[in-house]
Amino acid sequence: MTVEITDVGVDLGGRPVLRGVTATAREGRWLAVIGPNGAGKSTLLKAVMGLLPHTGLITVGGRPVRDLAPRDRARVLAYAPQSPLLPPDMTVHEYALLGRTPYIPYWGRESARDTETARAVLDRLDLTGLAARPLERLSGGERQRVVLARALTQQAPVLLLDEPTTALDLGHQQQVLELVDRLRRDDGLTVVSTLHDLTLAAQYADDLLLMSGGTAVAAGGPGEVLTEDLVTRHFGARVSIGAGPAGRPVVHLRRPTG
Amino acid sequence: MRKGVVFAGAAVVLAACMAAGLMVGAAGLPLKGVLLALADRLPFVSAHSGLTPLETGVLFELRLPRVLLGAMVGGLLAVAGAGYQGVFRNPLADPYLLGAAAGAGLTVTLVIVAVGDGAAVPLAAFCGAAGGVLLAYGLGHTATRGGGTATLVLAGVAVTSFLTAIQTFLQQLKVEELQRVYAWILGDVGGGWEQVAMCAPYAVVAAAILLLHGRLLDVLSVGDDEASALGVRAGRVRLVVLVAASLATAAAVSAGGLIGFVGVVVPHAVRRLAGGSYRVVLPLSLLAGGAFLVTADLIARTVLAPAELPIGVVTAFVGAPFFVTILRATRKVET
Ligand SMILES: Nc1ncnc2c1ncn2[C@@H]1O[C@H](COP(=O)(O)OP(=O)(O)OP(=O)(O)O)[C@@H](O)[C@H]1O
Ligand SMILES: [Mg+2]
C-alpha cells in the first residue's frame, strides 16, 4: 500500500513542528526519513499513524488516515515508537500478542492462530528463549526487538519504524534490517523508518527523505540525498561520502585535521 | 497449567475463609453442622445438620448474610481498585484513596439525613463515587500537567479530606442520626439479607463489566498512543472501566461503609503472585478481596469480643504498612 503525504503540517504545544511536508512511500518500497535531532521525524511518523491532528493530507492506499476507524487503521499501519512504554511485568509473549489487538473483537480474546502468529514472529527475531521473561528484565536491544516483534505481529501492509536499530549491536542491526527487508520483498510491505545511521539508511532504503527544522529539504534516492553538501549543511557534521556496495553511498565522519 | 492452579487456590482460600466466618463467633458452630445445614437448603438435598434451632437461626440470619456481604464488599473494592489502577496506569489508585469512597460516603450521608434509608442510596453512592474520582483526577491533572503516580493519590487524599469534612458537618447537624452514620462510616458488613439483596445486582453488573475489560486494560498499559495505534479507543475503554469501577465502589460503600486499603493491597499482592496481566489481576482480586475482607471481619468481631471493632480499623491496620511498601516500590520504578 502506498503512503502519500501531501503538504502536511503539525502543531505541538502551540508551536509549528512540521510544515509543508510532502513525500511518498510507494508500495513495496522502503522510505528512510533522516535528519538531525528535533527535525520532526518522529512527529511525521506519528502523524502518518493518525495519532496527531494534522493539516494537509495523509493517505494510505488512497484513503485518508484521519477518516479511518482505529481498528481499520491498525490493520493497515503498524507502528513501533522510538521510546515505547513497556509495562514492567508483562511477558515478552504477552507483549508481542498485543499486536493481534486489531483483529480481536471488543469482548473477544485471542485465538490459537493469534498465539501462533506471535510465536512465529518471536522465533524470527531470535526471541523465543525470552518469551516468558517480563519486559523489565530485558536488555535495551532485547526490548527494541520485542517492540519490533509486536509491530510485525500486527501483520499490517505498512510498517512505521521509529529508530528500530539504535540500541542494537552490529549483528542484530543487520538481522533486524534484513528481516524487515525480506518481509518487504516477500510480502510487498511498505516500510517507512527513521534511521540515524546514514550509511545503513543508504544500504536498505530505496528512497530517502531528509528533514530539517520541520520541513522536508531533500528527497530521492540515496545517491541524490546523501551529498557532502546537504549532510554538512543540515547535520552540521564534517563528513566524507564514498561509494559503498552496490553503488550506495557510505558516510564517514571526518576528524578535523590540523 | 499455572494460571488454573492459582485460580483454584484463590477459590479454595475464599471458601476456607468463608467457612471460618460461618463457624467462629460468640457461639461457635461445628464445620460439619454448618456444611450439612447449608447442603440441606439446596434443592433436592436433605441433610440432618444436628444444629439446634437457635444455632440454625444464628447461621442463616446472622453469619451467612454477614459472610456473603463481606465477600461481596471485599471483592468489589479489590476489583474496583484494580480497575482504577488500569484506567490511571497507577498501582496506587484505590477507591478509598481516589476520593471515590468519600464521594459515595458524602452522598449517602446526604440521602440518609435528608430522606432516610431507601432505594436512592445506591444511586446516590454511584454519583458520589464517580464525582469523587473525577474531582481527584481533575485536580491531580491540573496540579502537575499530566501528573505522576503519587500526585493522583495526593489529590485523592485532598478530595477525600474535603468531602469527609462536609460529611462530618452534615452528620453533626443531625445528631440523632450520628450513631448510625458513624457505625456505617467505619465499615460494617453486618447489614443482613436486606443489604445483600440490595448490593448483589450492582455487584454482578459491575464485576462482570470489569472482568470483561481485562484484555483491553492490558492494551492500555502500553500507553494511549500505542493503544490507539493498536486500534483501541483508549478514551472509551477508560470511561467504561471508570464507570464500572465507580459502580462497584458505590455498591460496596452503600452496603459496607468506608473500608480502606482493600483496593490497593489486594491487587498488589495478586500481582506479586500471579503477574501483572489484568486478565488475571481482575478475577483474582475479586476472589482474594472477598477472602481478605471476610477474614478482616472475623478479626473485627472476635478480637475485642463481645465488643466489635469497626472493620475499617482492621483493614487500615494491615493495609497502611503495606501501602508504604508499595509506594516505595513504585518510587524505585519511576526514577
Ligand atoms: N508534545 C510536544 N510539544 C511540543 N513540542 C514537541 C512535542 N513533541 C516534540 N516536540 C518538538 O518537536 C520537534 C520535533 O520532534 P521529533 O520528536 O519529531 O524530532 P525527531 O526528528 O524525531 O528527533 P530525534 O532525532 O531526536 O528523535 C522537536 O523540536 C521537539 O522538541
Ligand atoms: Mg525521533
Image (cartoon, coloured by chain):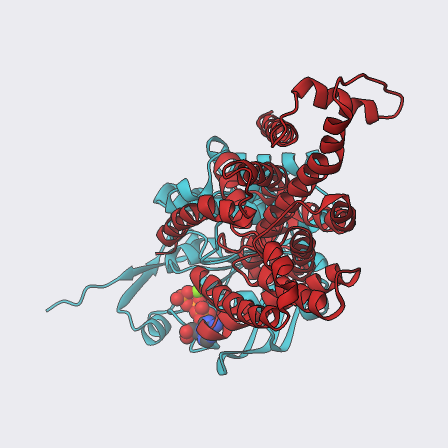
Chain colours: A cyan, B red
Would you place residue A68 above or below residue A115 in this image? Answer: below
Residue A190 visible in this rendered orientation of the protein:
no
Q: Position of residue B303 (x, y in %)?
A: 50, 37
User: Which of the two residues, A155 or B56, is positioned nearer the viewer here?
Assistant: B56
User: Which of the two residues, B47 or B210, is positioned nearer the viewer here?
Assistant: B47
Task: Identify the image quadrant of the C terminus of chain A.
Answer: bottom left
User: Which of the two residues, B270 or B200, is positioned nearer the viewer here?
Assistant: B200
Q: Quadrant of ligand 1?
A: bottom left
Q: Position of residue B218 (x, y in %)?
A: 59, 48
- Residue at the limit of the structure toward the left, as seen here: A258
Would you place residue B78 above or below residue B171 in this image? Answer: above
- Residue at the limit of the structure toward the right, as seen here: B44
Which corner quadrant of the image does residue B114 belong to? Answer: bottom right
Q: How many numbered discs, if any?
A: 0
Q: Position of residue B320 (x, y in %)?
A: 43, 49
Task: Identify the image quadrant of the N terminus of chain A.
Answer: bottom right
Residue B9 visible in this rendered orientation of the protein:
yes
- Image-based side of A150 in relation to B44, left or right: left
- Image-based side of A238 in relation to A121, left or right: left
Q: Residue at 47% of width from left, 73% of height from top? A: B145
Q: Position of residue B258 (x, y in %)?
A: 58, 55
Q: Residue at 42% of width from left, 44% of height from top? A: A136
Q: Residue at 37% of width from left, 73% of height from top? A: A230
